[in-house]
Image (cartoon, rainbow, N blue to C red):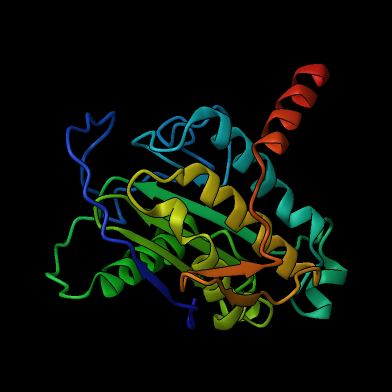
Amino acid sequence: MNTALEIQLVVGLMVFGISFAAQAEWRPEDFPNPWTEFNKCGQPRPSYLCDPNNIVSRKYSDFIEYHLNRVPNVTNCPCSTWHCEHTTKPEGYKIAIAVMTKMKNDYDFDDKKDLAFNFAYGLESKRWDFGSCENDIIILYSELDGMIYTLAGSTAREKLSLTKAGEIQGALLHFFKPGGNVGHGLASMVLNYVAVLRDEYFMPSWTIDGNGAASVQHVIVLPLAVIALYRVFEFLLN
């Protein structure tokens, strides 16, 4: 990936007393591939979600995994006409998520944004490589670094602009603050990103209430009822 979309939202997380199911700090070269090492990512099958420290609950993880796996099939092939017409099963965009306790800062980056970019780019270019024409998007969440970060290839960026991604993440930022529901935030982010890629997203309008608090309209915030409905549907299918 030669170009990238960078979104930085530092939320100042401070968490204590965590017991780690995997290593506490991660380098990009050591972070598992959720498609080939899904068991190390805490997933029961090949996936585009890797959460080796089990930060996201199983309920939300299943929901997120389901929708990430659908993205290539519910979005149009954005690559060259030749590629899309001559591929047996042309795929659309791909979104992958890396969730971890903390990034290991081997290069002493002063800015967490630079550390997140280095990590996400390392995953995309060396460890994961899910895109075929810069059509991939990586969402990175690092709990103790207080970082939610989006990196997109040049093709994906033609749809998911810096402005759109920033508005979506800004509207969902409260889910990533201390006490927030990270799984809920990531699930809502995925649904919004897919809406953008399918040209079904309406630009949000920010409003300020009487207390000076900002609110946003049109951004999808995933209801718990949707999670429950999906779980019932999954049970019936099985």
Q: Residue at x 24, y 31 (%)?
A: 20
**Of residues 119 and 84, the one drawn nearer to the viewer in this rendering:** 119
Residue at 53% in and 51% down: 186
**Relative side of 125 to 199, left or right:** left
Q: Residue furthest front?
A: 210
The residue most toward the right is: 85
Q: Height in image: 235 above or below 87?
A: above
Counting the numbered discs, the total is 0
Q: Residue 99, percent across and down? A: 40, 48
Q: Quadrant of residue 190?
A: bottom right
Up the image or down, 179 lies above or below 132; here it is above
Q: Position of residue 224 (x, y in %)?
A: 64, 37
Q: Is residue 39 left or right of residue 164?
A: left
Q: Position of residue 189 (x, y in %)?
A: 58, 57
Quarter holding the C terminus?
top right
| Residue displayed at 44% across by 31% down | 42
For residue 48, side relative to residue 21 (left or right): right
**Residue nearest the observer in this picture, 46 or 5:** 5
204 vs 238, left or right, is: left
Residue at 48% over, 55% down: 128
Percent across and percent down for residue 223 are 67, 43
